[in-house]
Image: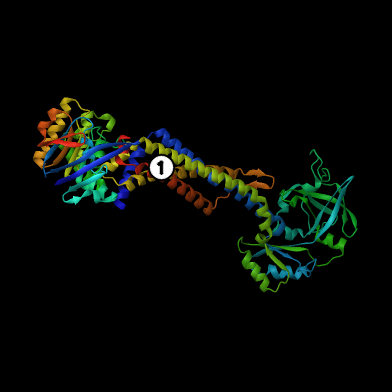
């Protein structure tokens, strides 16, 4: 499903070149729950950003369902993100001007669905993430764990092929983290959802099918 | 396109609904005042232009003016010409005038001016001097030794300064008139009029019969003023008069006043133009600042929107829609304010030296103001949102 070949990413900070990814190659199967782990600065978030089309690599190739996604135009990348990918960021990243429900159904609205259908599907998704009663609350009225569940519901609403999660539990306590990870595991097992999750917590390993360890921009072990 | 516009509209609505109410009210208030300013000052200038035109129609030219042929000093056979014109349906009346230079003297004061002859019955139909009498009475057909004069000639008794007038003569005073042919005759001042400061108050009138007896003229005039039933039909009637075989110069009031109005209102129009430009600059700055601050403050949100697959154009359009919301709200509130202001000034017109001025708001002025405000709002909404929305996703989210 995902094929990564010799992926490189170099950042320029003034005159200094930072080699965040130095040539990474691996594959992810359909329905796999892959963990990306490694110390800070190892390149795991950078890798996730390249795979999720949030950033453009300096070199290499990424194929998702046989499509070379780096050859897509900016508009095609936007559509690809909307229709096939889902994101959960570590800082919740939900929109403060929208209620929890509006945050969740926004991608459906963008896909051209009727508002009534968007609301119904949004509410269904809220039940899945066990947040139904908080649907009409704004970001400031939600706890960190609730916000992250809203972000997960939004990431899943368009039934993405791949769910990307960048340290989704970084700002959560252990209990909330466990709930989120169990939810991921359940989605993976029940719906066959492909998940790529970045984490640096050793105890998160048990939720993933496979772990790729990164160090200094290279794969240390798979 | 349409479904995307729906998303832009959705985002814009939510943003306005959940934005700071104080900022929204203040922005709309500024936009409404800008709209008022865009329309109000030009409407006053239009009011001035309209008053000037009205004054000249009512006192100097009528709707159409007939003047002597190129090399003639006077129009001959005036009576038959007037009858010919009056027979046409749509002509309300005609008034012939004979004009001569004269010197008016009272005691030790004297002033030069133009003396007009008037047929009072005709003048009442065509002009409005009879309505502008501030003292005494208007002329009657049988008057021979009586004169009416404008306030600029008679002067005001208590007025200080070195005015070029007769120093405040009153009704009943004797005025000595020296005609251009050397005849000197004394007249009783029957009435004083004040119709406008556009020069009409420096006119003086005696009856047509009296003028003919002094000058020995008969059935002649310097001009014939024609009053039509309907304003705006002048060109049509000018053509009809030419078809009647009238060889004298025929001019509509518009042809006669074009230069005068332009001279008077041109300075005002420059001020209006400057005021319009300043208003539009303020509108650009206000909208730009509001949208710019908004996009900077919501930079992370824009990044998130892009990350979840919301098209950059949808995001930009949502900010343009917000700018349009401020613009249209300003126009609506501004229109209400203008309506109140115009209603007040219509019943309580502003007093200008040339007369009372009411604001005149034409459709073109409204359209022009709405369009200009709309265009500046679109530009001011587009630039900051486009600038922020084209940033890379990661930079927008994490800085």
Q: Residue at x 61, y 49 (%)?
A: B269
Q: Is residue B302 visible?
A: yes
Q: Residue at x 84, y 47 (%)?
A: B172
Q: Is residue A17 left or right of residue B77?
A: left
Q: Which residue is mark 1?
A: B384
Give the camera-side residue of B46 and B63: B46
Q: Disc 1 sits on a residue from what chain?
A: B
User: Neighbour class for label 1 at 10 Å: few (<14), some, many (≥20)?
Assistant: many
Give the camera-side residue of B391 and B208: B391
x, y (%) of residue B198? 71, 50
Q: Secondary structure at mark 1?
A: helix
x, y (%) of residue A164? 19, 39
A40 versus B392 height, above or below: above
Q: Residue at x 73, y 61 (%)?
A: B122
Q: How is the image coloured?
A: rainbow
Give the camera-side residue of B307 and B15: B307
Q: Quadrant of residue B295?
A: top left
x, y (%) of residue A205? 12, 31
x, y (%) of residue A197? 17, 36
Q: Is residue A113 visible?
A: no
Query: How many discs mark residues in the rendered view?
Result: 1
């Amino acid at each position: 499903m995902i094929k990564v070949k010799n992926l490189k990413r170099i950042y320029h900070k003034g005159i200094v070149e930072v080699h965040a990814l130095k040539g990474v190659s691996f594959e992810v199967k359909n329905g796999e729950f892959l963990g990306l782990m490694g110390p800070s600065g190892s390149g795991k978030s950078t890798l996730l950003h390249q795979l999720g089309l949030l950033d453009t690599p300096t070199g290499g190739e990424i194929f998702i369902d046989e499509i070379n996604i780096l050859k897509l135009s900016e508009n095609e990348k936007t559509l690809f993100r909307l229709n096939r990918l889902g994101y959960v960021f570590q800082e919740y990243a939900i929109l403060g001007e929208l209620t929890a429900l509006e945050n969740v159904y926004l991608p459906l609205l963008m896909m051209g669905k009727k508002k009534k259908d968007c609301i119904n599907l949004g509410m269904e998704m809220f039940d899945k993430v066990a947040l139904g009663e908080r649907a009409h609350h704004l970001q400031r009225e939600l706890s960190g764990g609730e916000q992250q569940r809203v972000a997960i519901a939004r990431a899943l609403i368009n039934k993405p092929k791949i769910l990307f999660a960048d340290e989704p539990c970084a700002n959560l306590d252990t209990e909330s983290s466990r709930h989120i990870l169990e939810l991921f595991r359940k989605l993976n097992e029940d719906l066959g959802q492909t998940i790529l999750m970045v984490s640096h917590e050793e105890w998160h390993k048990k939720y993933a099918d496979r772990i790729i360890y990164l160090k200094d921009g290279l794969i240390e072990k798979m | 396109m349409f479904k995307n516009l729906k998303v832009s509209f959705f985002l814009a609505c939510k943003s306005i609904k959940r934005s700071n109410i104080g900022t929204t009210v203040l922005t709309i208030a500024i936009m409404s005042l800008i709209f008022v300013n865009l329309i109000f000052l030009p409407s006053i200038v239009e009011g001035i232009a309209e008053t000037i035109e009205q004054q000249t129609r009512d006192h100097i030219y009528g709707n159409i003016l007939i003047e002597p042929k190129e090399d003639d000093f006077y129009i001959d056979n005036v009576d038959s010409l007037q009858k010919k014109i009056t027979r046409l349906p749509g002509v309300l009346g005609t008034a012939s005038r004979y004009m001569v230079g004269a010197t008016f003297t009272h005691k030790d004061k004297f002033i030069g001016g133009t003396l007009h002859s008037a047929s009072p019955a005709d003048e009442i139909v065509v002009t409005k001097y009879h309505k502008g009498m501030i003292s005494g009475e208007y002329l009657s057909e049988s008057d021979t030794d009586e004169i009416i004069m404008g306030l600029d000639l008679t002067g005001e008794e208590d007025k200080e300064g070195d005015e070029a007038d007769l120093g405040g003569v009153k009704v009943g005073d004797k005025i000595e008139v020296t005609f251009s042919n050397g005849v000197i005759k004394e007249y009783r001042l029957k009435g004083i009029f004040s119709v406008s400061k556009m020069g009409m108050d420096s006119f003086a009138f005696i009856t047509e019969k009296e003028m003919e007896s002094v000058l020995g003229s008969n059935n002649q005039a310097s001009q014939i003023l024609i009053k039509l039933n309907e304003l705006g039909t002048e060109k049509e009637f000018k053509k009809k008069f030419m078809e009647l075989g009238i060889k004298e110069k025929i001019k509509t009031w518009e042809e006669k006043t074009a230069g005068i109005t332009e001279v008077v209102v041109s300075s005002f129009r420059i001020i209006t133009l400057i005021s319009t430009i300043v208003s539009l600059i303020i509108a650009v700055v206000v909208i730009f600042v509001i949208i710019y601050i908004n996009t900077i403050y919501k930079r992370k949100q824009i990044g998130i929107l892009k990350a979840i697959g919301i098209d950059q154009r949808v995001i930009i359009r949502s900010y343009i829609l917000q700018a349009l919301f401020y613009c249209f709200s300003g126009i609506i509130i501004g229109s209400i304010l203008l309506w109140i202001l115009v209603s007040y000034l219509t019943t309580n017109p502003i007093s200008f030296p040339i007369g009372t001025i009411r604001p005149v708001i034409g459709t073109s002025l409204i359209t022009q103001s709405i369009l200009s405000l709309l265009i500046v709002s679109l530009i001011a909404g587009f630039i900051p949102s486009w600038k922020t929305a084209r940033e890379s996703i990661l930079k927008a989210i994490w800085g």
